[in-house]
Amino acid sequence: CGFIRDLTEEKAHQAAILEKQLAAENLSKELQANQNIIMGILDAAFHALFVINEKCIIQMVNKKSCEVFGWTQEEFIGKNINLIMPDHVAVNHNHYMKHYLETGVKNMIGTQREVTARRKDGSTFPCILGLSETQQSGMICGFIRDLTKEKAAQAALIAKNKELEINQSLVMSILDASFHALFVIDEQCIIQMVNAKSCEVFGWTKEELIGQNIKMIMPPAIANHHDGYMKSYLETGMKKMIGTQREVTAQRKDGSTFPCKLGLSETKESGLICGFIHDLTTEKAAEAELLAKTRLTEKIINASFDAMFVINERGVIEMVNAASEKVFGWSHDEFIGQNIKMIMPMSRAVNHDSYLKKYMESGVKKMIGTEREVEARRVDGSTFPCILGMSEVDNGDSRQFVGFVKDITDQKKKLHLAESERDASDALLYNILPEHIANRLKEDPSHIADLYGNTTILFADIVGFTDRTSLMSPQELVVMLNDIFSRFDYLVDIYDLNKVKTIGDCYMVTSIPSDELEHDGCSRVCRFALDMMKAVRSFNNTGPRHGQINFRIGIATGQVVAGVVGTKRFLFDMWGDAVNVAARMEQSGLAGQIQVTKEVVESAGPDFTFERRGTLSIKGKGKMEVFILKSAHELNRKHSALDGRKPNSSRALRSASMIDNF
């Protein structure tokens, strides 16, 4: 018996099952291949990847997760995801997941949020967490991007930006503190930056300047062409102003212009052009003032009557004035650059450089700061006296010497003439007055009047003078008087006496009225009287045309008042009883005789011989005993002017030429 079971359906079913098994195997292989591809892709990702289930158990991680967190894939798989969380987050994570599964309220899923993660070594780091949910599997996929480097870079960037801000603020502070205006413009000439000084100098605010064309600060004549200049530079690259400094004219907001110095530079990276503007208004005004002062100084120096030289430390002439050319004869150009010794006589010039060198080394001043009379030399070789005054000027780096040279040639001539005139005036004064009285009068021109206790007075008169003059012409009379009186004048100087005056034919002489000279005044007057008589006899021996002459001489001694009278023609006159008595002695005397008072006899001393004449009635005095001076006992011949005695005073030297002989 055989049973036959149709296997067609079974075989077909088996074949279908086998086909399904093969399809499943192929699908599994394909899924595995796809999974491998996906894992390869995920492992190549730059960020860590975690896949967890609803119980927060890690199902999958990529290699970046191991690299970032430090665990291996085996250490990750099967662990709760709170493994990578800081403790304060981890303790609540399962609760967050349970709450989401119960409520479906998504807080983190579908978003990206910055959180803190924990590595295997316990260190934490900032990261971006992005979560998504797969609806079919219920798995939650999370990508974690490590922000450590980004945060460091961000911190560095923030620090750099802060530093840039500080630097920019510092730069702006520096630029705002600058003494000069600053403008930064672009290639279209638009102002990008200005400093505070720009606003101060030009009058616009920063807001008014920024964004405007730079030509707003230029006068119209320049502004109209400025954009063309910039265009030409951008096309050709030829720099005319950039990299240079140039003096230009700028314009303020109020339309006024001023001189300034413009310096331009270009920043290659930005293409911006930076310009500094230095206002020259004050400097130009100072330069103008300095120039005016310099010109005024030059005019003053050139207006000086005295030559001026400025030399350096080597003695080289650096400056002269117009008077130097006039005084010395060299031109300005011939002076400059030459050694100052060119104006010195050879005897001084050969040593001048060594003098200057010695001063520079020792600092010992001899001429500097003083005035001294020296000799200078002109271009023609002639020399002249001058006053040299020198001073030193310290300019810091160098030293200069200024010398003024005053030609005193004319001054010397005038001084010599003045001295000659003074000597002549003194000689005249000494001829009129006693020397010590003349000296007193020169020192004090006020009234001179003194009382002298012992002065000897002499009067001499020509006998019969009136009758004689009637027979003579005026010229003959003057010649005769001049001849005889000149002989007397000579004797006055010989005996150091004082000629008071002549009145007609009367000749008045006294001893010098001074206490220092009164010890022998009377004896000198007596000797003088004896020599007067000899002088008269000498005159008579010449055979005068109108006959011989004779004199009466009277002498008295006593107290007198003496003083200078007159302001135009000085006269040293005397008054007193002794003067009157002397006049009476002459008037009552005998021709050819010398009549004296008893006081004269007593004062003259033993060298003289007197003869008693007797007692006479003298007007104003009554009876007086009078004497005749006859001679000098044993008279030393050296005391006689007629025996060649030389004058014993300067007065005699000035008068000696008036007497040729006796």
Image: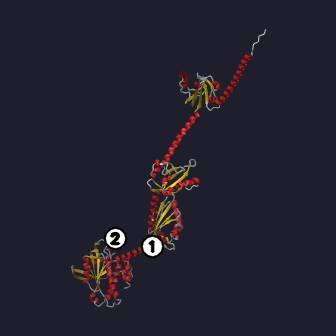
Residue 268 pos. (x, y %): 58, 49
Residue that carries the numbered disc 1 in the rendered image: 409
Residue 343 pos. (x, y %): 51, 69
Task: Using the image, determine if residue 346 lies above or below residue 478.
Answer: above
Residue 113 pos. (x, y %): 55, 30
Q: Secondary structure at mark 1?
A: helix
10 Å crowding of disc 1: few (<14), some (14-19), many (20+) = few
10 Å crowding of disc 2: few (<14), some (14-19), many (20+) = few
The label number, if any, that marks residue 443 in the structure image: 2
Quadrant of the snapshot with the N terminus: top right
Q: Residue 560 or 127: which is nearer the viewer?
A: 127
Q: Residue 447 or 389: which is nearer the viewer?
A: 389
> Residue 574 lies in what quarter of the image?
bottom left
> Residue 111 lies in what quarter of the image?
top right
- The outermost residue toward the top is 1
Quote the CA–CA distance across marks 2 and 1: 30 Å
Is residue 469 in sight in this rendering?
A: yes
Comparing labels 2 and 1, the label whose residue is closer to the camera: 1
| Badge 2 amino acid | Glu
| Badge 1 amino acid | Thr
Q: Secondary structure at mark 2?
A: helix
